[in-house]
Amino acid sequence: MNLSVLRILDANLNRAREALRVLEDYARFALNDETLCGELKDIRHGLAAATGAVGARAIHLRDTAGDVGTEIKTQAELRREDMAAVVVAAGKRLGEALRTIEEYLKTISPDDAGALEKLRYRFYDLELRVVRTLRNPDRFGTARLYVLITESICRRPWLEVAEAAIDGGADCLQLREKDLDGRELLSRARAMVEICRRQNVLSIINDRVDVALLADADGVHLGQTDLPATEARKLLGPDKIIGVSTHNLAQAKQAALDGADYIGVGPIYRSSTKSRDILPGLAYAREAAATMTIPTVAIAGITESNVDEVLATGVRAVAVTAAVVGCDDPRGAARRLKGRFEKQELHAVNGR
């Protein structure tokens, strides 16, 4: 048996095991996802089963002090920007190591090399699923007041209402028009995106990924029966925001795994703007806020009179329609709602 081959196998087995542990810890502690964690663990065990005998022999040829590669490093290897960079680097390292092990193992045990090939392809699928969960924490930013714009509810011209909501403190606007034809929807989307960009406010389009793309909106919001977030991401690319409506924790966890940047949580209360058969209410908002690592946005029936109890659940933001756009003074309504966040944050600071 070629001793150089054994040294190569030993080095890459170390790389693979280390990278797997990095990914497994991310799935376990950052995502709190039992399924991904278990599948990565299965790959680790599969690697041990396929290489156990050769690995036990190869370790005795290890010569760290005499390895000419230990001191060769690039600047990129010495720094990671954030957790996402750590995870991506580990994924690349694992894929490379598995391929190297597979190729050199062919010279010793073709059957074991075949088992490595299957593991490698399993990992490629897992890598995609892990990468979907990586998101820029600043993408949804510090959004707190999220206002949905629907013309039929507005008491003044819709674009005027949108501008007033921004003036009152809205951090994000969503264009929600279910019944407009595509041409008119796109025209309105472009108009809303323009004022949002001018005021440094996020612009989201409800349901329509195509319109969000053509209008160059910041993102899209999807319901449970709309295009899946995984498919929307293929079209939108990595930098756009995807929000997903959820009604229970299972849907919330799936949305996060599918790459959502935030989840809509609700309905919280009965709403005059949309009839719903289910009402998860405050209990679900509290559960989602305590469990999910991505922003939670409470929605449905939220008003000035009940927003404090909604904020007490720990949700990141509230989404409103009638409470702002259905008012004679949308600017003032938005300002008062935004003030409730500021009051809550002040109480939190003073209560420490």
Image (tube, grey):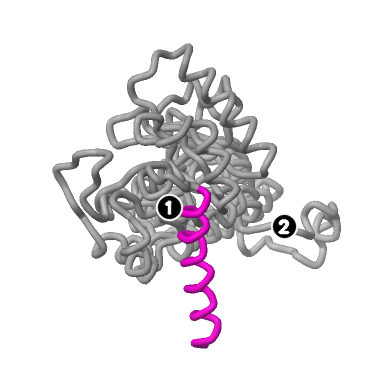
Find the distance from the CA under tag 2 to the CA under tag 1. 22 Å
Q: Which residue is mark 1?
A: 40
Of marks 2 and 1, the one in the foreground: 2
Q: Where, by quadrant of the figure, is residue 201 drawn?
A: top right
Q: Which residues are magenta?
A: 331-352
Q: Dot 2: within a 10 Å radius of its alpha carbon, few (fewer than 14), some, or many (20 or more) residues?
A: few
Residue lying farthest to the front in this orientation = 328
Residue at 55% from the left image edge and 37% from the top image edge: 203
Residue 137 vs residue 207, the one in the foreground: 207
Q: Residue furthest left?
A: 277
State which tag comes first along the sequence, 2 or 1. 1
Query: Above or below — where is 104 with respect to 90?
Result: above
Identify the main secondary structure in magenta.
helix
Tell me which amino acid carries mark 1. Leu
Instruction: Residue type at mark 2: give it.
Output: Arg
336 part of magenta stretch: yes
Identify the secondary structure beneath mark 1. Answer: helix
Q: Is residue 186 left or right of residue 299?
A: right
Q: x%, y% of residue 121? A: 46, 35
**Of residues 189 and 228, which is closer to you in this image?**
189
Q: Position of residue 337 (x, y in %)?
A: 46, 59
Q: Is residue 18 above or below residue 250?
A: below
Q: Secondary structure at mark 2?
A: loop
Q: Tell me which corner region of the image, top left, top right, bottom left or bottom right, holds residue 314.
A: bottom left
- Residue 104 in view: yes
Name the residue tied to disc 2: 80
